[in-house]
Amino acid sequence: MPSAPDFPLLCPVCRNSLRSGGDGARTLVCGAGHSFDAAKQGYFNFLVGKGTAFEADTAQMVAARFDFLSAGHYQPLADAVAELAAPALAGVREGRPAVLDAGTGTGHYLRTLLDRFVPDRFEPGCVESNPVEGGGRAVDAGSGIVPTAIGLDISKFALRRAARLNPEALNVVGDVWQPLPVADNAVDAITVVFAPRNAPEFARVLRRGGRLVVVTPRPGHLAEIAGQTGMLGIEPAKDERLAASLGGHFAPVEARDLDLALALSPRDVTRLAFMGPAGHHLDRSALAALEAALAPSTSVSARFRISVFAPLA
Ligand SMILES: C[S@@+](CC[C@H](N)C(=O)[O-])C[C@H]1O[C@@H](n2cnc3c(N)ncnc32)[C@H](O)[C@@H]1O
Ligand SMILES: [Zn+2]
Protein backbone atom coordinates (compact mmCIF):
# COMPACT_ATOMS: atom_id res chain seq x y z
CA MET A 1 0.00 0.00 0.00
CA PRO A 2 1.23 3.51 -0.73
CA SER A 3 1.98 6.09 1.88
CA ALA A 4 -0.79 8.66 2.26
CA PRO A 5 1.31 11.82 1.75
CA ASP A 6 1.86 10.66 -1.83
CA PHE A 7 -1.77 11.34 -2.56
CA PRO A 8 -3.56 14.64 -2.94
CA LEU A 9 -6.55 13.23 -1.05
CA LEU A 10 -9.46 15.03 0.54
CA CYS A 11 -11.57 13.80 3.43
CA PRO A 12 -14.91 12.62 2.01
CA VAL A 13 -16.72 14.05 5.05
CA CYS A 14 -15.28 17.56 5.48
CA ARG A 15 -12.96 18.07 2.46
CA ASN A 16 -9.86 18.77 4.58
CA SER A 17 -6.64 17.09 3.42
CA LEU A 18 -6.17 13.50 4.45
CA ARG A 19 -2.85 12.25 5.79
CA SER A 20 -1.48 9.04 7.13
CA GLY A 21 -2.66 8.30 10.66
CA GLY A 22 0.76 7.32 11.93
CA ASP A 23 0.45 3.57 11.54
CA GLY A 24 1.98 3.31 8.15
CA ALA A 25 -0.54 3.40 5.36
CA ARG A 26 -3.41 1.64 7.11
CA THR A 27 -5.23 4.67 8.51
CA LEU A 28 -6.01 8.02 6.95
CA VAL A 29 -7.05 10.98 9.09
CA CYS A 30 -8.02 14.59 8.41
CA GLY A 31 -7.48 17.70 10.52
CA ALA A 32 -11.05 17.50 11.82
CA GLY A 33 -10.42 14.02 13.18
CA HIS A 34 -12.28 11.90 10.63
CA SER A 35 -10.48 8.62 10.32
CA PHE A 36 -10.56 5.84 7.74
CA ASP A 37 -9.06 2.39 8.27
CA ALA A 38 -7.95 0.20 5.42
CA ALA A 39 -9.97 -2.98 4.99
CA LYS A 40 -7.88 -6.07 5.52
CA GLN A 41 -7.63 -6.45 1.74
CA GLY A 42 -5.98 -3.03 1.60
CA TYR A 43 -8.64 -0.71 0.17
CA PHE A 44 -10.34 2.26 1.85
CA ASN A 45 -14.09 2.76 2.02
CA PHE A 46 -14.93 6.44 1.47
CA LEU A 47 -18.66 5.97 1.00
CA VAL A 48 -20.16 8.13 3.71
CA GLY A 49 -23.66 9.05 4.80
CA LYS A 50 -26.45 6.93 3.48
CA GLY A 51 -24.36 5.88 0.54
CA THR A 52 -25.46 5.68 -3.02
CA ALA A 53 -28.50 4.17 -4.65
CA PHE A 54 -26.30 2.77 -7.41
CA GLU A 55 -26.24 -0.97 -7.89
CA ALA A 56 -22.58 -1.97 -7.52
CA ASP A 57 -21.07 -4.88 -9.41
CA THR A 58 -21.47 -8.13 -7.52
CA ALA A 59 -18.69 -10.52 -6.49
CA GLN A 60 -19.71 -12.89 -9.32
CA MET A 61 -19.61 -10.12 -11.92
CA VAL A 62 -16.23 -8.99 -10.67
CA ALA A 63 -14.87 -12.55 -10.73
CA ALA A 64 -16.07 -12.96 -14.33
CA ARG A 65 -14.37 -9.68 -15.28
CA PHE A 66 -11.14 -10.63 -13.57
CA ASP A 67 -11.01 -14.03 -15.29
CA PHE A 68 -11.87 -12.63 -18.70
CA LEU A 69 -9.36 -9.78 -18.53
CA SER A 70 -6.64 -12.02 -17.07
CA ALA A 71 -6.95 -14.25 -20.14
CA GLY A 72 -5.61 -11.28 -22.14
CA HIS A 73 -8.49 -10.87 -24.60
CA TYR A 74 -8.61 -7.09 -24.12
CA GLN A 75 -4.89 -6.55 -23.60
CA PRO A 76 -4.49 -4.50 -26.81
CA LEU A 77 -7.10 -2.14 -25.37
CA ALA A 78 -5.23 -1.87 -22.08
CA ASP A 79 -2.02 -1.16 -24.00
CA ALA A 80 -3.70 1.54 -26.08
CA VAL A 81 -5.21 3.23 -23.01
CA ALA A 82 -1.82 3.19 -21.32
CA GLU A 83 -0.12 4.57 -24.40
CA LEU A 84 -2.58 7.45 -24.69
CA ALA A 85 -2.57 8.30 -20.97
CA ALA A 86 1.18 7.95 -20.40
CA PRO A 87 2.40 11.20 -22.01
CA ALA A 88 0.44 13.24 -19.46
CA LEU A 89 2.28 11.35 -16.72
CA ALA A 90 5.77 11.27 -18.14
CA GLY A 91 7.67 13.88 -16.21
CA VAL A 92 5.81 16.89 -17.52
CA ARG A 93 5.91 18.79 -14.24
CA GLU A 94 7.79 18.84 -10.99
CA GLY A 95 6.93 16.27 -8.39
CA ARG A 96 5.33 12.90 -8.76
CA PRO A 97 2.65 12.63 -11.44
CA ALA A 98 -0.73 11.26 -10.39
CA VAL A 99 -3.37 9.23 -12.19
CA LEU A 100 -6.99 8.56 -11.25
CA ASP A 101 -8.64 5.47 -12.69
CA ALA A 102 -12.36 6.12 -12.27
CA GLY A 103 -14.49 2.97 -12.14
CA THR A 104 -11.26 0.99 -11.86
CA GLY A 105 -13.03 -2.37 -11.53
CA THR A 106 -10.46 -5.07 -10.93
CA GLY A 107 -7.65 -2.58 -11.65
CA HIS A 108 -6.61 -4.30 -14.88
CA TYR A 109 -6.19 -1.13 -16.97
CA LEU A 110 -4.43 0.77 -14.21
CA ARG A 111 -2.01 -2.15 -13.81
CA THR A 112 -1.07 -1.99 -17.48
CA LEU A 113 -0.56 1.77 -17.27
CA LEU A 114 1.63 1.61 -14.17
CA ASP A 115 3.70 -1.21 -15.64
CA ARG A 116 4.84 1.13 -18.40
CA PHE A 117 6.73 3.11 -15.81
CA VAL A 118 8.45 0.13 -14.21
CA PRO A 119 11.26 -0.92 -16.55
CA ASP A 120 11.40 -4.52 -15.34
CA ARG A 121 7.70 -5.04 -15.96
CA PHE A 122 7.45 -3.35 -19.30
CA GLU A 123 6.53 -5.80 -22.10
CA PRO A 124 8.92 -5.49 -25.03
CA GLY A 125 5.94 -6.02 -27.34
CA CYS A 126 4.78 -2.50 -26.55
CA VAL A 127 7.95 -0.82 -27.76
CA GLU A 128 6.73 -0.47 -31.30
CA SER A 129 3.82 1.69 -30.23
CA ASN A 130 6.04 3.56 -27.87
CA PRO A 131 9.02 4.69 -29.89
CA VAL A 132 12.08 6.11 -28.23
CA GLU A 133 15.08 7.57 -29.99
CA GLY A 134 17.78 4.98 -29.89
CA GLY A 135 15.08 2.40 -29.41
CA GLY A 136 14.00 -0.19 -26.98
CA ARG A 137 12.91 1.37 -23.73
CA ALA A 138 9.51 2.82 -22.92
CA VAL A 139 9.49 6.59 -23.08
CA ASP A 140 7.45 6.62 -19.86
CA ALA A 141 9.89 4.53 -17.88
CA GLY A 142 12.61 6.90 -19.08
CA SER A 143 11.38 9.60 -16.70
CA GLY A 144 12.25 7.27 -13.84
CA ILE A 145 9.21 8.44 -11.89
CA VAL A 146 6.41 5.95 -11.31
CA PRO A 147 3.13 7.83 -11.03
CA THR A 148 1.15 7.76 -7.87
CA ALA A 149 -2.26 6.26 -8.54
CA ILE A 150 -5.80 6.21 -7.23
CA GLY A 151 -8.28 3.55 -8.28
CA LEU A 152 -11.88 4.46 -7.45
CA ASP A 153 -14.89 2.18 -7.75
CA ILE A 154 -18.24 1.81 -6.09
CA SER A 155 -17.93 -1.96 -5.77
CA LYS A 156 -15.99 -3.26 -2.78
CA PHE A 157 -15.73 -6.61 -4.53
CA ALA A 158 -13.93 -4.91 -7.40
CA LEU A 159 -11.68 -3.04 -4.97
CA ARG A 160 -10.63 -6.26 -3.26
CA ARG A 161 -9.26 -7.45 -6.57
CA ALA A 162 -7.80 -4.07 -7.48
CA ALA A 163 -6.01 -3.76 -4.14
CA ARG A 164 -4.34 -7.11 -4.75
CA LEU A 165 -3.41 -6.30 -8.34
CA ASN A 166 -2.25 -2.73 -7.68
CA PRO A 167 -0.87 -2.71 -4.15
CA GLU A 168 1.10 0.45 -4.83
CA ALA A 169 -2.07 2.37 -5.67
CA LEU A 170 -4.60 3.83 -3.30
CA ASN A 171 -7.79 1.86 -3.90
CA VAL A 172 -10.92 3.63 -2.76
CA VAL A 173 -14.56 2.60 -2.61
CA GLY A 174 -16.37 5.75 -3.68
CA ASP A 175 -19.10 7.08 -5.91
CA VAL A 176 -18.00 8.89 -9.04
CA TRP A 177 -21.20 10.94 -8.88
CA GLN A 178 -20.24 12.39 -5.50
CA PRO A 179 -17.49 15.00 -5.00
CA LEU A 180 -14.26 13.08 -5.61
CA PRO A 181 -11.91 12.67 -2.62
CA VAL A 182 -9.12 14.34 -4.58
CA ALA A 183 -7.71 17.88 -4.35
CA ASP A 184 -8.19 20.48 -7.10
CA ASN A 185 -5.75 20.28 -10.04
CA ALA A 186 -4.07 17.31 -8.42
CA VAL A 187 -3.98 14.65 -11.10
CA ASP A 188 -2.28 14.55 -14.48
CA ALA A 189 -4.38 11.85 -16.11
CA ILE A 190 -7.80 10.30 -15.59
CA THR A 191 -8.72 7.01 -17.20
CA VAL A 192 -12.33 5.85 -17.50
CA VAL A 193 -12.84 2.46 -19.11
CA PHE A 194 -16.53 1.60 -19.54
CA ALA A 195 -17.40 3.51 -16.41
CA PRO A 196 -19.42 6.62 -15.52
CA ARG A 197 -18.01 10.09 -16.13
CA ASN A 198 -18.57 13.04 -13.83
CA ALA A 199 -17.34 15.84 -16.07
CA PRO A 200 -17.38 18.73 -13.55
CA GLU A 201 -15.50 16.70 -10.95
CA PHE A 202 -13.01 15.34 -13.47
CA ALA A 203 -12.38 18.92 -14.60
CA ARG A 204 -11.86 20.07 -11.02
CA VAL A 205 -9.23 17.45 -10.17
CA LEU A 206 -7.40 17.38 -13.51
CA ARG A 207 -4.63 19.91 -13.84
CA ARG A 208 -4.29 22.13 -16.90
CA GLY A 209 -2.40 20.17 -19.52
CA GLY A 210 -3.67 16.88 -18.09
CA ARG A 211 -5.61 14.33 -20.11
CA LEU A 212 -8.88 12.45 -19.70
CA VAL A 213 -8.85 9.11 -21.53
CA VAL A 214 -12.26 7.51 -22.05
CA VAL A 215 -13.08 4.11 -23.52
CA THR A 216 -16.52 3.53 -25.00
CA PRO A 217 -17.94 0.73 -27.15
CA ARG A 218 -18.70 1.42 -30.81
CA PRO A 219 -21.75 0.18 -32.68
CA GLY A 220 -21.35 -3.52 -33.42
CA HIS A 221 -19.36 -4.18 -30.25
CA LEU A 222 -19.87 -7.86 -29.33
CA ALA A 223 -22.80 -7.93 -31.77
CA GLU A 224 -22.34 -11.62 -32.56
CA ILE A 225 -23.24 -12.66 -29.03
CA ALA A 226 -25.33 -9.75 -27.76
CA GLY A 227 -28.67 -11.36 -28.65
CA GLN A 228 -27.75 -14.84 -27.48
CA THR A 229 -26.46 -13.71 -24.12
CA GLY A 230 -29.04 -11.03 -23.39
CA MET A 231 -26.36 -8.31 -23.23
CA LEU A 232 -27.64 -4.78 -23.42
CA GLY A 233 -27.42 -3.34 -26.93
CA ILE A 234 -25.06 -0.52 -27.84
CA GLU A 235 -27.12 2.61 -28.05
CA PRO A 236 -26.62 4.63 -31.23
CA ALA A 237 -25.01 8.08 -31.15
CA LYS A 238 -23.04 7.25 -28.03
CA ASP A 239 -20.17 9.24 -29.43
CA GLU A 240 -22.13 12.44 -29.66
CA ARG A 241 -23.48 11.83 -26.18
CA LEU A 242 -19.96 11.37 -24.85
CA ALA A 243 -18.82 14.67 -26.34
CA ALA A 244 -21.98 16.42 -25.12
CA SER A 245 -21.63 15.04 -21.61
CA LEU A 246 -18.06 16.34 -21.39
CA GLY A 247 -18.67 19.57 -23.32
CA GLY A 248 -18.30 22.71 -21.29
CA HIS A 249 -15.49 21.08 -19.35
CA PHE A 250 -13.36 19.20 -21.90
CA ALA A 251 -12.33 19.49 -25.53
CA PRO A 252 -11.55 16.45 -27.68
CA VAL A 253 -7.87 16.01 -28.52
CA GLU A 254 -7.76 12.73 -30.38
CA ALA A 255 -9.67 9.48 -30.77
CA ARG A 256 -8.49 6.05 -31.75
CA ASP A 257 -10.68 3.15 -32.85
CA LEU A 258 -9.60 -0.35 -31.96
CA ASP A 259 -11.20 -3.49 -33.33
CA LEU A 260 -10.34 -6.90 -31.95
CA ALA A 261 -11.31 -10.20 -33.57
CA LEU A 262 -11.73 -12.54 -30.63
CA ALA A 263 -12.04 -16.32 -30.69
CA LEU A 264 -13.74 -17.16 -27.43
CA SER A 265 -14.35 -20.39 -25.59
CA PRO A 266 -17.87 -20.99 -24.22
CA ARG A 267 -16.66 -20.05 -20.75
CA ASP A 268 -15.18 -16.79 -22.03
CA VAL A 269 -18.43 -15.91 -23.82
CA THR A 270 -20.40 -16.26 -20.61
CA ARG A 271 -17.76 -14.42 -18.60
CA LEU A 272 -17.93 -11.58 -21.07
CA ALA A 273 -21.71 -11.47 -20.83
CA PHE A 274 -21.70 -11.61 -17.07
CA MET A 275 -18.97 -9.06 -16.39
CA GLY A 276 -20.79 -6.00 -17.79
CA PRO A 277 -23.91 -4.11 -16.74
CA ALA A 278 -26.00 -6.96 -18.14
CA GLY A 279 -24.61 -9.14 -15.34
CA HIS A 280 -27.11 -7.46 -13.02
CA HIS A 281 -29.99 -8.88 -15.05
CA LEU A 282 -28.71 -12.11 -16.54
CA ASP A 283 -30.08 -15.39 -15.40
CA ARG A 284 -27.15 -17.58 -14.42
CA SER A 285 -28.87 -20.86 -15.22
CA ALA A 286 -29.70 -19.63 -18.75
CA LEU A 287 -26.06 -18.62 -19.15
CA ALA A 288 -24.93 -22.07 -18.02
CA ALA A 289 -27.27 -23.64 -20.59
CA LEU A 290 -25.88 -21.30 -23.24
CA GLU A 291 -22.34 -22.22 -22.30
CA ALA A 292 -23.17 -25.90 -22.76
CA ALA A 293 -24.69 -25.21 -26.18
CA LEU A 294 -21.89 -23.03 -27.59
CA ALA A 295 -19.35 -24.21 -30.15
CA PRO A 296 -15.79 -24.70 -28.86
CA SER A 297 -14.86 -21.33 -30.35
CA THR A 298 -17.06 -18.31 -31.13
CA SER A 299 -15.85 -15.41 -33.28
CA VAL A 300 -16.67 -12.10 -31.63
CA SER A 301 -15.77 -8.54 -32.70
CA ALA A 302 -14.89 -6.11 -29.96
CA ARG A 303 -15.14 -2.52 -31.19
CA PHE A 304 -13.76 0.22 -28.96
CA ARG A 305 -13.19 3.94 -29.21
CA ILE A 306 -10.51 5.49 -27.02
CA SER A 307 -11.10 9.23 -26.78
CA VAL A 308 -8.65 11.69 -25.30
CA PHE A 309 -9.86 15.00 -23.89
CA ALA A 310 -8.13 18.06 -22.49
CA PRO A 311 -9.69 20.27 -19.82
CA LEU A 312 -10.93 23.61 -21.08
CA ALA A 313 -9.13 26.54 -19.57
C1 LIG B 1 -18.12 -2.12 -16.89
S1 LIG B 1 -17.20 -1.96 -15.38
C2 LIG B 1 -15.58 -1.43 -15.93
C3 LIG B 1 -14.49 -1.68 -14.90
C4 LIG B 1 -13.07 -1.44 -15.39
N1 LIG B 1 -12.83 -0.07 -15.78
C5 LIG B 1 -12.79 -2.37 -16.53
O1 LIG B 1 -12.99 -1.98 -17.68
O2 LIG B 1 -12.42 -3.50 -16.27
C6 LIG B 1 -17.86 -0.49 -14.70
C7 LIG B 1 -17.28 -0.21 -13.35
O3 LIG B 1 -17.76 1.04 -12.91
C8 LIG B 1 -18.08 0.91 -11.55
N2 LIG B 1 -19.07 1.95 -11.25
C9 LIG B 1 -20.34 2.02 -11.67
N3 LIG B 1 -20.93 3.10 -11.16
C10 LIG B 1 -20.03 3.73 -10.39
C11 LIG B 1 -20.06 4.91 -9.60
N4 LIG B 1 -21.17 5.65 -9.50
N5 LIG B 1 -18.94 5.26 -8.95
C12 LIG B 1 -17.81 4.51 -9.05
N6 LIG B 1 -17.72 3.39 -9.79
C13 LIG B 1 -18.82 3.00 -10.46
C14 LIG B 1 -18.62 -0.50 -11.41
O4 LIG B 1 -18.58 -0.98 -10.08
C15 LIG B 1 -17.66 -1.24 -12.34
O5 LIG B 1 -16.51 -1.72 -11.68
ZN1 LIG C 1 -12.67 15.21 7.66
Image (spheres, helix red, strand yellow):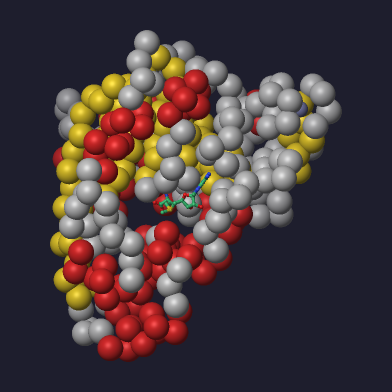
Residue 247 at what x, y percent from top left? 33, 24
Query: Which corner quadrant holds the N terminus?
Result: top right
Q: Is residue 77 left or right of residue 197?
A: left
Indicate which quadrant contains ligand 2. Answer: top right
Residue 60 at what x, y percent from top left? 52, 69
At a point 22% along the width and 57% down the height, the residue shown is 221
Query: Which corner quadrant holds the C terminus?
Result: top left
Residue 119 at what x, y percent from top left? 37, 39
- Residue 281: image quadrant is bottom left
At a point 24% along the width and 36% down the height, the residue shown is 240
Q: Is residue 41 visible?
A: yes
Q: How many marks?
A: 0
Q: Is residue 268 visible?
A: no
Q: Is residue 47 left or right of residue 57?
A: right
At a point 73% along the width and 31% down the height, the residue shown is 13
Depth check, front residue: 13 or 187: 13
Q: Is residue 306 left or right of residue 23?
A: left
